[in-house]
Amino acid sequence: MEVDSVHHTIEQKIKNKAIYSPSDYVRFFREARLHPSPYKVNYLEHSFFQNYSDVCALKTIRPGKKAGDPQVVDIRGLKYSPDGQILFKLGHDEDWKKLFVRGNSSTVIGDPIPLLTAKKKLTAAKYTHLHQLKMVIPKDLHTFYDLLPHD
């Protein structure tokens, strides 16, 4: 599968590398493959994640309308956009297409709400342990660890 190739490429890049912060992962992921084009990496904040469980209840996600059209098992990706659209892909290299929703096959309940209103806090023990590791972490990253939310 394509995703196995991606994971292998990234694993080879980070093998035996020192990783001190989440931004190190982002950098190594981007550098893992340069040709034919680098991997696209999005650094996500806690505010990105939304709860869609109460937004829409679909009876079907079949991308086709009639016999012979694509079926649910042909879907390779689903994407919920902020404007409420549901998009799908039948192949990893394809563009996103809008999912056709039949007549009354869905019930719209409301807008998504944030899953997290603030960054999760570390326990006091984990915060203390991370600070004990600062003796092996480059000094320019100490502020990152100092500013982590904790109990």
Image (cartoon, grey):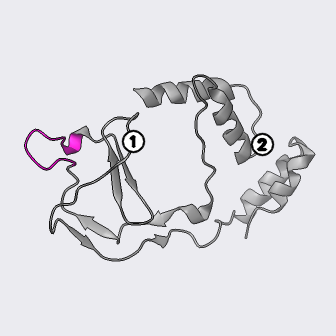
**Which-is-in-front pick, marks 1 and 2?**
1
Which amino acid lies under the numbered mark 1 shown in the image of this protein? Asp
Left or right for 46, reference 54: right
| Identity of the residue furthest to the bottom in this view | 110
The amino acid beneath tag 2 is Tyr
Q: Residue at x 17, y 47 (%)?
A: 64
Q: Quadrant of residue 51?
A: bottom left
Relative to 93, does residue 41 appear above or below in the rendering? below
Label 1 sits on residue:
95
Write down the region rendered in magenta.
Answer: 63-73
Residue 1 coordinates in the image, percent (x, y): 39, 26
In percent of width and height, residue 129 lies at: 78, 53
- Secondary structure category for the residue under label 1: loop
Quadrant the C terminus occupies: bottom right
| Residue 20 numbered tag | 2
Kindly identify the residue that appears in the image at 45 percent across and 64 percent down: 82
